[in-house]
Image: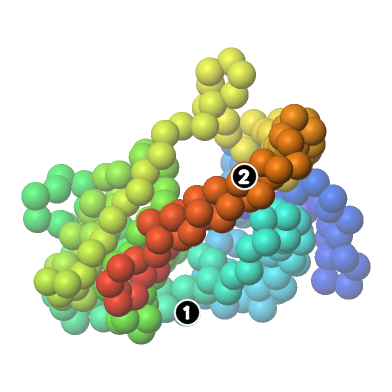
Amino acid sequence: MLIANLELSYPNYLSEMPDIHDLEHFYVEAKKKFDGDEVFKKKAYETTVKLQTGDSQCRKAWEIICEISRKEFNKVYDLLGVRLKEMGESFYDKMCREIIPVLEKKDIVLLDQGAKIIRIPGFKQPMMVVKSDGGLTYDTTDIAAINFRLGELKRDWVIYVIASEQDMHLKLLFEAAKLCGWTTQNTRLDHMGFGLVLNEHGKKIATKDGGSVKLIWLLKRRKNKLRRKLKRDMKKVKRSQRRVHRHSFRENRLFCCKVLRPSTKQKIFIQI
């Protein structure tokens, strides 16, 4: 959808870097076209398939959008002091195509009206790994990802920090991993769900609607508020007591580290 909008709004994007400062506005604009223009919707679907099959022009458009996103994400990471290895959805692109024949060899893939699905015992809802138009799905990506984490990274414990709305999807995913024989008796797969993020009117915040509160804004606001409070509190604390407060802070920080640090030698992967 975003690539289709990029091609439409910035036809010279291959030679001239698009001037996109607000990616959220760009997304909202694309979503409106997707919902209201059937021609644009068809183009968006076709573009997705082309990207998944390695089309060079689509890949370049995708890289441009990723770089714009990356600059914004890094502002948050820098503020939090976070350093990470980038392993987003696109990291698994190649693995997605490679995982299909692996699943087919396990004889768990079924054809359903031109699409390829996996039926999980005990669940009515199947997992779709290839759509009827040849496109891949989130199911495909997640199956490829969990295979990589359990097989290549050799993780014993995988934690998914994802909204509670995805509970059923993750139950299917975990069962699919077991069905494929990728887990052992020592493997632990957990979903750490969280509730809806609501606005001041009690309605779910959706990026497609625009106007969402930015995390960077909340972090800066909280940081400034805590700084002001700390200055006020420190003025009330006598000089002789400050050493006690600092000692308590060190003790609490040490306690938190002990609680959060796994006591075993498990290798853990956390998806947020």
Give the camera-side residue of 255 and 90. Answer: 255
The disc label shown at residue 94, or none: 1
Q: Is residue 238 above or below residue 52?
A: above
Marks 1 and 2 in Cβ contact (< 8 Å): no
Q: Is residue 96 left or right of residue 247?
A: left
Q: Position of residue 230 (x, y in %)?
A: 73, 37
Count of numbered circles on the image: 2
Q: CA distance from mark 1 to mark 2?
A: 53 Å
Residue 116, image x, y percentages: 27, 63
Q: Toward which corner of the image does residue 164 lie, by quadrant?
A: top left
Between tags 1 and 2, which lies in front?
2
State the residue position of label 2. 245
- Report the residue at 27% width, 45% height from top: 168
Where residue 222 sits, quadrant-wise, is: top right
Label 2 packing within 10 angstroms: few (<14), some (14-19), many (20+): few
Q: Residue at x 83, y 71 (%)?
A: 14
Mark 2: amino acid: His
Across and down, in percent, residue 136 comes to: 42, 64
Q: Residue at x 42, y 78 (%)?
A: 95
**Which of the two discs, 1 and 2, labels the residue nearer the N terminus?**
1
Residue 22 visible, this angle: yes
Q: Amino acid at mark 1?
A: Lys
Q: Residue at the far left: name it.
A: 122
Q: Nearer the viewer, residue 111 or 189?
A: 189
* Residue 108 visible: no
Q: Secondary structure at mark 2?
A: helix
Judge from the rendering whether residue 233 lies leftward or rightward of residue 91; answer left or right.
right
